[in-house]
Structures are given as C-alpha cells and as structure tokens.
Image (cartoon, rainbow, N blue to C red):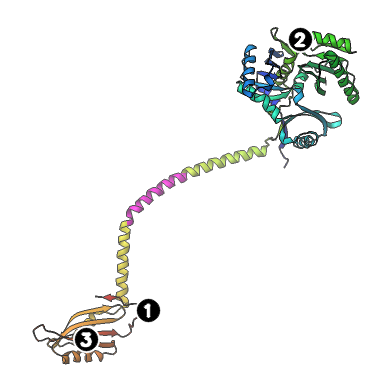
C-alpha cells in the first residue's frame, strides 16, 4: 500500500496575509515609532497609512507601563486605531543566518535547520525565538534564511504594545519588510537598500526577491561620510561572496531628509543613488508619510498581503505537520466506519430499551422477595419435617410401647422428652419403689429397642392419693448413639 502521508512546512506569517484583507505593522525605535497599515486592492496592495511619531527622550529607560503610555499617545497622535498589529523587530536586535542544506523532505529539512541553528547561534536555543524562510538554492540545494532574537528583547518590545491596547499577532525582522518593497524584476540585478535610522543605518542587498546581505551599521556621528564607508564595506563583502556587482543604491523613504541622504551619497559613491520607488503592485495614498521609519512596517504589510510572500514570523515559526490525501480505500473504510457507527448506535438504543425492561422486572422481583422468603422458610420446614419422618423413629409407636409396659394402677408417666440423637427422658409417679423398679426391669428386657435404661432419681411425693414416689429415668434408643462433640438438642 502506498503511503498517503506527506509532510508540509507551514509558515504562519504567509497564511496570515492570505486570511486578512488589512494589516497593521509597528516599528518601535528608541526615539521614533514607525507605523503602517495596508489592505488588499484589485491591483495588488494599497498602503492606507504610513506615519512616524517621535517618542520621549527617556523612552528606552522607562518601565513597561511608561513605555505603554508613550506608545498609546504616539498612536493616538497619528490618528491610528490599532487593535492588533505585527511588531517589526529592529535589525540591530536580530541574528540572521543564511545557509544551504541538502534537499529533503520537509520533516528532514526542519530537523536539519534546528541542528544548524544549534551550531551557529551564539546563544542556546532555549534563550531565543527562531524562525526561518525556505527558498530554492543552486544545484538542488535548499536555501535557508534563519533569524533569531533573544526572548528578553522580544518581550521588551511586545509587552508595552500589549499594555497599550494593541494585540501583537506576529513579529518580523525589519530586513524582510524592506525586501518586499524592492521589485523582483529590477533591470539592474542586485540593489542595495539603505534605511537611515536614529543611530545608524540598515543595509539590505537583494536580487529577484532573495536577500543576500543584511546588516545594521552603527554610526558614531560622522554622518553621511561614515554611512558611505559602511555601504562600501557591505558592497565589497557582497562582491567577494557572490561575485556580483551592485550598481544601484536605493534610499528608503520620501521627503526632504531622504533627498538629503540621496544627494550626500551620490557625491561619495561611484554608483547610482536614488529614493526607493515602490514596485508596481504597491500603491500609497497621498496623505501617507512614507518616511524611513515607516519603510520596514510598510514592507511587512505588503508582504503579509501578497499571495506568495514568506516572512519568517518569530511568534509563529514554521511547523511540520502531516498532510493526509485520502484514497478510495480510505473512502470505503470511512463508509464502513459510518455503517458500524450506525449499527452501534442502533444496538445501544435497543440495549437501552432492554435495560429499561430489566429495571422494571427487578422492581417487581424486589416486591416479591418477602413472599418468596416466606415460601422458602415454609419449604425448609417441610423438608426438615420430611427428613425427620424418614430418618427418625416413629415416636408415636414408641410412646404406645412405653405405655403398654405400665400398670396404671401402680405407675403412670407425667412427662416425656425426646432428643434427635435417640435419648429419652421420662418423668412419672409410682405408688412405691417396687412398681418403679418393675417398670425399669421390663424396659431393660427390650434390648433390641433400648440400648440403655437407667434411673436418674426417686423422690418422696406428698401429693395424694397414694402415689408416694416421683421418679425420672434416662433411656437410650439402640442405633441412635450421640455423635461425638455435638450437644444433643431436646425435642418435646
């Protein structure tokens, strides 16, 4: 049987864009808050809002509650109403690695990425949040672009936003947002995107939708001169690694500050320098302020709304799951299972009805139990009586035989007790000792019937008329000796 299970790597960030018609992104810098909103349109993606608002000078040193208050005020000044957003992580906080892996199943690829990250990251995996993107590499290889951010740094960005009332649904590195703003089919091949920041600049080299270099350049106050030096370093490193010449530099953002950076770099670089123009599938409303601080959030909005964009999301990293493809055998099995389920349900219904009947019968039986107990006791008595009649002597005949040996003028019996083991006790009165002795002698002659006949005592009787002796005797019937260890039970 051919297996119908296959593995898929799912990117939550990519699926997020497909399920939403509009998204918000926020870039939290040390002194500036960059914001962008976008929505799907018939021609592609429309940026409905781009803005940058200043933050207090002591923003970075404030407690989370103070930062949340400053963020809420900045969002309110921009006229935005962000109930949810994707936070854009500054490149300076992220660790980015690009490497090639052998092609394999998604499950194997996922394991290899985790193993490679364990080797390359300077921090243990349990202290960072990681994610990665997958693309085709040369000669059957797979290109992996992995990112990692310390968990503490990520929490410091997310917690104030959440407290400010903006639910964070994802976290994307700023470089991946800038990558979405560069046209995939740029006529001059690789381009370098520069994003001037508060204390430095972010540099991204991209070609055909792939990012080959991303770094954050910290500037120490030398301004455009130092920025030009950092750009030359990045281009030299790219040329040595990729054997590719970058001829065009794009500066993100619109406005006077961007024009000033473009003019300064043109005078210092031997390459074409111009402002970043949004690709044809992305439009921006006139009132939107496409500033450098809003460039990365705008790119994240574009990437989330594009159909085939892959943004590594640190809050929703890729996961591996089994995808199931049903076959005809599975359809038949499902039908059989459904029929079995119906049969089980019907049997349970029938059992429930039978249980109800059984409960009724048990109630009737409990009502009959007292009568049955009385009948049982009666039967037990009858059985005992039958056993007595079958296995014991005919006591009436015996008593007749005892009376036949009496002379009523001389002696008579007042009481007789019989026990089951054959022991008789007789009590009577006699005129004198001679009459009683004669009676005992007559009984002792009946050896075939009596095993033992003995007097137990003779007493003087003062009752008239004439019977002056009271006596008692013990008689043991032959063949009915008492069992050893069992006390005889008297029977009257």
Q: Is residue 5 above or below residue 439?
A: above
Q: Position of residue 412 (x, y in %)?
A: 16, 84
| Camera-side mark, 3 or 2 | 2
Q: How many marks?
A: 3
Q: Which mark is residue 161?
A: none
Disc 1 to disc 3: CB gap under 8 Å: no
- The numbered mark, 3 or 2, whose residue comes first in the sequence reads 2
| Camera-side mark, 2 or 1 | 2
Circle 2 residue:
254
Q: Quadrant of the N terminus?
A: top right
Q: Which stretch appears magenta?
A: 350-369
Q: Quadrant of the C terminus?
A: bottom left
Circle 3 residue:
457
Circle 2 SS class:
loop
How packed mark 1 is, by other alpha carbons closer than 10 Å (few <14, some 14-19, many 20 or more), is: few
In this view of the protein, can residue 187 be seen by the observer?
A: no
Circle 1 residue:
485
Picture quarter containing residue 311?
A: top right
Query: Foreground: 312 or 352?
Result: 312
Circle 3 SS class:
strand
Q: Position of residue 343 (x, y in %)?
A: 53, 42
How packed mark 3 is, by other alpha carbons closer than 10 Å (few <14, some 14-19, many 20 or more), is: few
């Amino acid at each position: 049987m051919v297996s119908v299970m296959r593995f898929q790597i799912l990117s939550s960030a990519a699926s997020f864009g497909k399920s939403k018609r509009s998204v918000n992104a926020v870039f939290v810098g040390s002194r500036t808050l960059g914001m962008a909103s976008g929505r799907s349109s018939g021609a592609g993606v429309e940026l409905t809002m781009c803005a940058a608002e200043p933050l207090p000078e002591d923003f970075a040193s404030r407690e989370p509650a103070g930062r949340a208050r400053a963020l809420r005020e900045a969002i309110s000044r921009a006229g935005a109403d962000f109930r949810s957003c994707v936070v854009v992580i500054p490149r300076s906080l992220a660790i980015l690695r690009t490497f090639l892996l052998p092609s394999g199943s998604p499950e194997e690829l996922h394991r290899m990425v985790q193993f490679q990250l364990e080797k390359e990251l300077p921090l243990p995996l349990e202290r960072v949040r990681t994610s990665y993107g997958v693309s085709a590499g040369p000669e059957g290889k797979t290109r992996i672009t992995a990112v990692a951010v310390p968990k503490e740094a990520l929490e410091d960005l997310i917690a104030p936003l959440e407290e400010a009332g903006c639910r964070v649904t994802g976290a994307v590195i700023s470089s991946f947002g800038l990558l979405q703003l560069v046209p995939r089919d740029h006529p001059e091949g690789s381009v370098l995107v520069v994003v001037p920041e508060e204390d430095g600049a972010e540099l991204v080299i991209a070609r055909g939708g792939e990012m080959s270099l991303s770094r954050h350049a910290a500037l120490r106050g030398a301004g455009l001169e130092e920025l030009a030096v950092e750009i030359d370093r990045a281009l030299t490193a790219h040329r040595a690694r990729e054997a590719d010449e970058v001829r065009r530099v794009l500066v993100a953002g619109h406005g006077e500050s961007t024009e000033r950076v473009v003019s300064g770099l043109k005078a210092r670089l031997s390459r074409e320098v111009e402002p970043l123009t949004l690709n044809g599938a992305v439009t921006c409303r006139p009132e939107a302020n496409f500033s450098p601080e809003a460039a990365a959030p705008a790119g994240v909005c574009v990437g989330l709304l594009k159909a085939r964009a892959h943004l590594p999301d640190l809050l929703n990293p890729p996961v591996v799951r089994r995808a199931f493809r049903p076959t005809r055998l599975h359809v038949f099995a499902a039908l059989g299972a459904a029929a079995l389920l119906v049969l089980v349900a019907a049997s349970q219904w029938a059992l429930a009805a039978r249980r109800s009947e059984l409960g009724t019968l048990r109630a009737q039986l409990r009502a009959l139990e007292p009568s049955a107990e009385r009948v049982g006791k009666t039967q037990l008595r009858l059985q005992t009586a039958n056993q007595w009649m079958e296995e014991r002597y005919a006591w009436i005949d015996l008593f007749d035989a005892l009376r036949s040996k009496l002379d009523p003028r001389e002696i008579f019996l007042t009481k007789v007790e019989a026990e089951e083991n054959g022991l008789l006790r007789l009590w009577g009165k006699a005129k004198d000792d001679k009459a009683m002795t004669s009676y005992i002698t007559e009984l002792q002659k009946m050896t075939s019937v009596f095993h033992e006949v003995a007097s137990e005592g003779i007493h003087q009787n003062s009752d008239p008329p004439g019977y002056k002796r009271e006596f008692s005797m013990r008689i043991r019937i032959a063949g009915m000796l008492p069992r050893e260890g069992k006390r005889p039970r008297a029977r009257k």
